[in-house]
Image (cartoon, grey):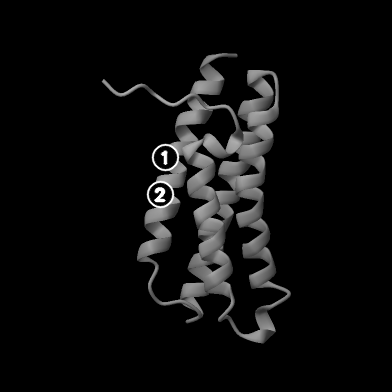
Amino acid sequence: MEEKAKIKNFYDLVAWQKAHQLTLLIYKITEHFPRAEQFSLVSQMRRAAISLGSNIAEGFGRGGMKDKAQFYLIAQGSLYELQSQMFVAHDLGYWSDLTVFHKLADETGRLLSGIIKSAVART
């Protein structure tokens, strides 16, 4: 039977790994947005994506479960913000195929929900 790997760092969390992949995807996607969006939608989307992984990392580093849960909840809010912004980008015609984005965002969301529930249960 395979032994579950010990999580020693925030980057061992699968939720953070998926959030990181999502951030890289957003950076690649937004490279092709119109120049006029550079300081508005592009900036907003990149900040939300960065916030997602950063808050997972910060939550991991917190000592108390209540603090952990709070930062994981902020990360979840950033994910929802990013999803909303992606709909705007899609509806404006800046990005047509949302399949990969939705798949990765959904995976990240499920993993985040799991670590939030775990942290809340331990408070």
| Residue 4's disc number | none
**Residue toward you, 15 or 91:** 15
> Going by the image, does 4 lie left or right of 26?
left
Residue located beneath label 2 in the image: 106
- Residue 23 placement (x, y as % from top left): 56, 58
Q: Residue at x 51, y 35 (%)?
A: 13
User: From the viewer's perspective, is residue 101 above or below residue 41?
Assistant: above
Amino acid type at image mark 2: Asp
How far is disc 2 from disc 1 in space, using C-alphas? 6 Å
| Residue 110's disc number | 1
- Tell me which corner region of the image, top left, top right, bottom left or bottom right, holds residue 11: top right
Q: Secondary structure at mark 1?
A: helix
> Going by the image, does 78 lie left or right of 97?
right
Within 10 Å of the Cα at label 1, are there few (<14), some (14-19), or many (20+) other Cα atoms?
Answer: few
Whether residues under marks 2 and 1 lie with C-beta atoms below 8 angstroms apart, the answer is: yes
Q: Residue at x 59, y 77 (%)?
A: 31
- Residue 75 placement (x, y as % from top left): 60, 42
Q: Residue at x 49, y 24 (%)?
A: 6
**Residue toward you, 31 or 39:** 31
- Residue 10 placement (x, y as % from top left): 60, 35
- Tell me which corner region of the image, top left, top right, bottom left or bottom right, holds residue 49: bottom right
